Amino acid sequence: MFGSNVLELIQSNDNHPFRVALELNDTMRSGWQPQAPIQMYHCTDDEIVPYQNSILAKESLQRAEGPAISVIDPRLIPFFQDGSHTGCIPWALLAVNDWINDRI
């Protein structure tokens, strides 16, 4: 997405505008607290976005007095179904649809 020279500028300058913007939008460190339940769907076999990212997000957003936050692998049979980054999409969409329909 970025040329190597732009990436080097961002990485070498703590005050680079792009870095500053990312830090301003970092809800995990800002103390932001959700007001409604959050359910994240993430296949454990994702080879692009580590599953641990969702676990860290859950841990940073979950407060004792706050709404429920969960991380779920949406595959019905995780060990027999494609849990790659793109293979997870159909399972996640079905799970999101079910979760929303349960609340309507």
Image (cartoon, helix red, strand yellow):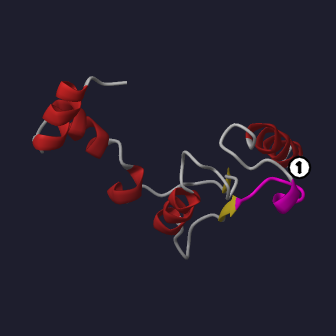
Residue at horizontal 23 percent and vertical 32 percent from the top: 7
Determine whether, in the image, residue 84 is placed left or right of residue 99: left
Q: Is residue 9 above or below residue 91?
A: above
Task: Give the quarter of the image for residue 30.
Answer: bottom left
Give the labeled residue for mark 1.
Answer: 102
Residue 57 x, y percent position in the rendering = 50, 59
Task: Classify 67 as above or below 23.
Answer: below
Judging depth in this view, the residue of 50 and 32 nearest the camera is 50
Expressed as whole percent of the image width and height from the top left, the position of residue 22 reads 30, 40
Look at the image and say whether residue 73 sits in the magenta stretch.
Answer: yes
Q: How many marks?
A: 1
Quarter of the figure with residue 23: top left
Residue 58: say if magenta: no
Please name whichever residue, 4 or 34, is drawn nearer the observer in this view of the structure.
Answer: 4
**Image-based side of 31 in relation to 99, left or right:** left
**In front of the other: 34 or 70:** 70
Quadrant in the picture for the N terminus: top left
Disc 1 crowd, CA 10 A, few/some/many (<14, 14-19, 20+): few
Q: Is residue 93 left or right of residue 25?
A: right
- Residue, x 26% and y 23% (percent of image)? 3
Q: Secondary structure at mark 1?
A: loop
Residue 65, percent from left and from top: 56, 73
Which residue is found at the position 54% from the left and 55% from the top? 50
Amino acid type, mark 1:
Asp
Quadrant where the C terminus sits is top right
32 above or below 66?
Answer: above
Q: Residue furthest bottom?
A: 64
Residue extent of the magenta highlight:
72-80
